[in-house]
Amino acid sequence: MPMTDAVLATKGISKSFGALQASLDISIDLRPGEIHALIGPNGAGKSTLIQQIAGGMKPDAGQIFLNGQDITALGTAARAKRGLARTFQISALAMEDTVLQNAVLGALGAQGRPFQVFGTALGKADLRATAEQALDRVGLMDHAKTRTSELSHGQRRQLEVAVALTLNPKAFVMDEPMAGLGTRGSKRLTGFLDSLREQAPILLVEHDMDAVFTLADRISVLVYGQIIATGTVDDIRANADVRRAYLGDDT
Amino acid sequence: MTRERKINAGLALALLAFPLWAYFANEPFMITLATKVAILALAGVGLNIALGQGGLVSLGHAAFFGIGGYAMGILASHAQTFDPIAEWPFLIEGTKSMPIIWIVAVLTSGLAALLIGALSLRTSGVYFIMITLAFGQMFYYFAISWPTYGGEDGLSIYVRNGFPGLNTLDPIQFFAITFVILMLAMGFAAMLAKSPFGLALNAARQSPQRVETVGMTPYRLRLVAFVISGMITGLAGALFADLNRFVSPTMFSWQTSGEIMVFIIIGGIGRLYGPLVGAALFIALEHILGGLSDYWHIYLGVLLLLIVLFARGGVIGSLAGRGHAHD
Ligand SMILES: Nc1ncnc2c1ncn2[C@@H]1O[C@H](COP(=O)(O)OP(=O)(O)OP(=O)(O)O)[C@@H](O)[C@H]1O
Ligand SMILES: [Mg+2]
């Protein structure tokens, strides 16, 4: 078992789509209280890795550990129940439902009693309190009654984060939460994620380099399915391989 | 009150007023038509839970409708010949009591829905449609080839089953029974839609990934919905058999499944009163046009086509607009 103090860890994850090697022997970990950023060019395999960690896709080889326990064989729902919360690069929300309903759905999942047929979902005080608190934290409370399909791209990202919050997870896995937010929105979310790491560590896939360099305790760089470097912001900035392969710098 | 609620209240009143008018105008056949509307609407309320809330396009709901019908037919036929259904391991006798028949109909159709759902919900899309269709047809052929209960000819029940304190042979009293059951079922469906379970079920239809990501399993949500759905449609089957005092394999046929689905689409998928509007239009067309032409289904087809092309929320959707997400 890798690094006992890691909240989340992968060990030798590999995945290929036909001839395309999307993940190759990936071992990364997420430690308590940290933000670990995963960066890499488009198509590097970041979302594919997230998908395997969250349970939506089975790795060809390797294992995934949550709090030291092997969760590789578990499905998405079981992983969520054990405390893994992920957000999607392409929003996966109940679009016909309101913002509040989506957040209540998260609270319901966290509560673990989905088969209640008596009483209304929005009328359950505990579910609602959890949901409203989460919406408030990401700044979506004003839109609680808005239909999700009417939200902007960026607001949907915020809702993704809010739903993840309702789970009160042990680890967050976020796939490009800043995308579509604009400068001001990114700044706000950056500030928020900065405070969130105390609640649970975050594995953060992000293209917004300002955010990454501000937030990350460690950065891993993924290129063609392989981690080419892991280290602090300074390490990564100074790493010649990374500069060549990713930052497009050949000096 | 939202616009849709007003429309719904008007529809419920119309369904009540029409047979009352027929009663005072001494038109018992019209009461029977209204009863048929209430019963078919009930079958539709059942299917609409799976279809509208769960997004499960089941073409096999005739199985539950038929099981409910045969539950009634078998229990009542044994009662009318004083011939027990089974003597071992314990004595099971037939009955002419509606409440007992309903309970049996609901339990047996629920059990069938559990088995069919457990297998077919592992698939989705076209495969789900085909598997539910296949299950429905399996019951159909089984009923045809089961001589004990009439085979192809079906089963006739000479006297309508009884309900304590009511004269079920009186059309208006039998109508009252079906009306109350329909209202209860619609109340239940409305409650379900807003309940925590309904929230999860509706979310699983829109984004199964989302539901899994928060720790719930779409398969289980859908299976429970499918069972509830089958139970309500099964209850409708028992009432339908009692209305006609006759059960036949036709109740199991895929056309029955298709008709229920068609009138839900006409009325409005996922709308609380969609099945009622659809069933009323269906019966009205059958009654009015069926007298003019044997090919009245063509007009039904045209109506369906118009709805699908121009009014995707069905009649309720066109009248009341898009549903409110936050009510
Ligand atoms: N289900 C799949 N089947 C086949 N190929 C896939 C599948 N999913 C991803 N890929 C391919 O795997 C590679 C990695 O994709 P992935 O989405 O993980 O990249 P990414 O790093 O998240 O990119 P981006 O920054 O654009 O989000 C891409 O070439 C993609 O086309
Ligand atoms: Mg991606």
Image (tube, rainbow, N blue to C red):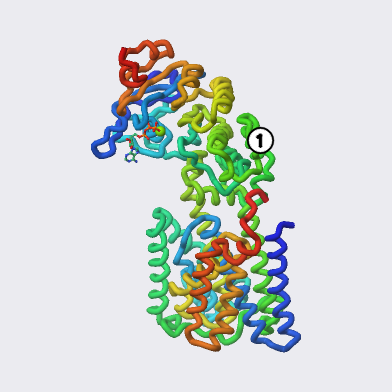
Asked if residue B218 is positioned above or below residue B238 in the image, the reply reads above
Asked if residue A108 is positioned above or below residue B77 in the image, the reply reads above
Residue B227 in sight from this viewpoint: no
User: Which of B25/B195 is in front?
Assistant: B25
Asked if residue B40 is positioned above or below residue A146 in the image, the reply reads below
User: Which of B156/B64 is in front?
Assistant: B64
User: Which of B301/B212 is in front?
Assistant: B301
Q: Chain of mark 1?
A: A
Residue A209, image quadrant: top left
Residue B137, horizontal then vertical, whole percent: 40, 71
Residue at 52% of width from left, 85% of height from top? B156
A222 vs A155, left or right, is left
Q: Which residue is mark 1?
A: A141
Q: Secondary structure at mark 1?
A: helix
A98 vs B21, left or right, is left
Q: Quadrant of the N terminus of chain B?
A: bottom right
Q: Tag count in the figure?
A: 1
Residue A76, image quadrant: top left
Q: Crowdedness of circle 1 by 10 Å Cα count: few (<14), some, many (20+)?
A: some
